Image (cartoon, rainbow, N blue to C red):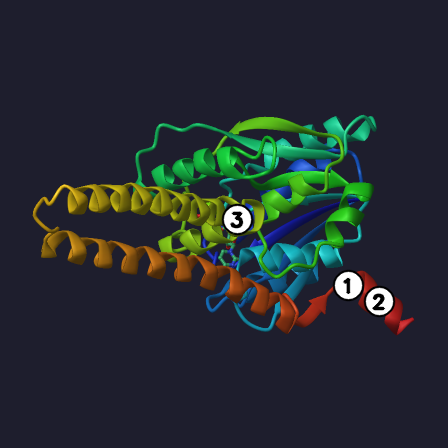
């Protein structure tokens, strides 16, 4: 069976089209399937629409979270509840086309591969968030310890062995494309054009995207720490050179160094230290969050006709 996991947060305009296109595509695989929607605390009619569809079609399952936890947590909930042998992750805004699912399944089905990652072909859109996303992918691809993570988002499909490994990663700082890469296995990419959203607005604000980017960088790269170390060493070298200069100018009886250079270096060193404290603070915050060990999400209800029917028997 194939499980398709779709997080939903206020997507009332496109749920019906989403379901219709997903069902049509999954039918083409010739396999049993379930579509597992995760309602991430929607406040519009999404939940009502999903419940309606779930009542009519027992292949549609619905997990409602107790509030909005963000889409990385929603995907995690889906991964935990999926019952399939193949599990696909797909955004609910149709930017990831469901029509690619049969091809992803075909690539996995002959057993040579474990994970298929959707690879976003560069699009010409100049919207500022697209430019920021591209910039992030470029930087992250170069600084992370992971290989081939550029242009890869959530859209993907994996088999049971990859899924079992993926489920074991319970860290709170979650950047799923990175975590999927971290587990290894035999993976390949499927290139696709990521279209603009046709209905509704992006539910990830620039602030959310920025936080996700920071999570990705702090959990998969040592760059922030290396940067501190590099600046620290540079500072030592500079002060050593300055020390020599001061000694020489003193011994040759040149005029004493002025007030401005003293003030500049105090400001410079002070601000560098604040930046470093900020970076260390980010690490401490992440360590703190891990040590609190709060669950990644809370489930309000799991609507699954098959389970309910089995319970009633
Ligand atoms: N989403 C979610 N919780 C959130 C934000 C988004 O479940 O807090 C869902 C959203 O409904 C969509 C998917 O995650 O199905 C991707 O979100 P979006 O399209 O807003 O992100 P973008 O494509 O702009 O990065
Ligand atoms: Mg989107």
Sort mark 2 into few (<14), some (14-19) or many (20+) by Cα contacts within 10 Å: few
Sort mark 1 into few (<14), some (14-19) or many (20+) by Cα contacts within 10 Å: some
* First along the sequence among labels 3 and 2: 3
Which residue, given by chain and number where applicable, does mark 3 sit on?
216
Residue at image point 63% right, 56% down: 37
Ligand 1 closer than 8 Å to label 1 CB: no
Q: Position of residue 281 (x, y in %)?
A: 46, 64
Taking 234 as reference, is 93 left or right? right
Quadrant containing the C terminus is: bottom right
Sort mark 3 into few (<14), some (14-19) or many (20+) by Cα contacts within 10 Å: many
Distance of mark 1 from mark 3, alpha carbons?
Answer: 37 Å
Considering depth in this image, is 247 or 68 the residue closer to the camera?
Answer: 247
Which residue, given by chain and number where applicable, does mark 1 sit on?
305
* First along the sequence among labels 1 and 3: 3
Q: Position of residue 303 (x, y in %)?
A: 71, 66
Q: Is residue 238 above or below residue 10?
A: above
Residue at image point 46% right, 37% down: 137
Q: Position of residue 8 (x, y in %)?
A: 55, 57
Whether residue 151 is visible, yes or no, is no
Ligand 1 closer than 8 Å to label 2 CB: no
Which residue, given by chain and number where applicable, does mark 2 sit on?
309
């Amino acid at each position: 069976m194939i499980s398709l996991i779709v997080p939903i947060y206020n997507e009332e305009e496109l749920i019906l089209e989403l379901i219709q296109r997903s069902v049509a595509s999954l039918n083409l695989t010739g396999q049993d399937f379930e579509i597992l929607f995760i309602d991430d605390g929607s406040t519009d009619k999404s939940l009502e629409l999903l419940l309606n569809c779930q009542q009519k079609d027992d292949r549609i399952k619905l997990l409602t979270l107790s509030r909005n936890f963000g889409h990385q947590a929603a995907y995690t909930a889906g991964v935990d509840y999926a019952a399939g042998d193949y599990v696909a992750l797909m955004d609910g805004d149709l930017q990831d086309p469901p029509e690619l699912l049969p091809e992803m399944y075909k690539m996995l089905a002959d057993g040579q591969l474990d994970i298929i990652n959707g690879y976003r072909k560069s699009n010409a859109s100049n919207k500022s968030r697209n430019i920021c996303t591209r910039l992030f992918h470029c930087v992250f691809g170069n600084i992370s310890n992971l290989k081939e993570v550029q242009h890869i988002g959530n859209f993907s499909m994996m088999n049971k062995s990859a899924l079992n490994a993926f489920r074991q990663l319970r860290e709170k700082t979650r950047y799923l494309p990175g975590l999927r890469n971290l587990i290894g296995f035999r993976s390949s990419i499927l290139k696709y054009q990521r279209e603009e959203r046709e209905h509704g607005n992006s539910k990830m604000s620039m602030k959310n995207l920025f936080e996700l980017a920071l999570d990705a960088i702090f959990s998969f790269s040592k760059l922030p720490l290396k940067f501190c170390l590099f600046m620290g060493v540079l500072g030592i070298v500079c002060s050593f050179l300055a020390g020599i200069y001061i000694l020489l100018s003193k011994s040759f009886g040149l005029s004493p160094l002025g007030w401005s250079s003293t003030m500049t270096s105090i400001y410079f060193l002070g601000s560098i230290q604040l930046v470093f404290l900020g970076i260390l603070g980010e690490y401490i915050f992440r360590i703190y969050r891990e040590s609190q060990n709060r669950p990644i999400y809370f489930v309000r209800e799991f609507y699954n006709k098959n389970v309910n029917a089995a319970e009633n028997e």
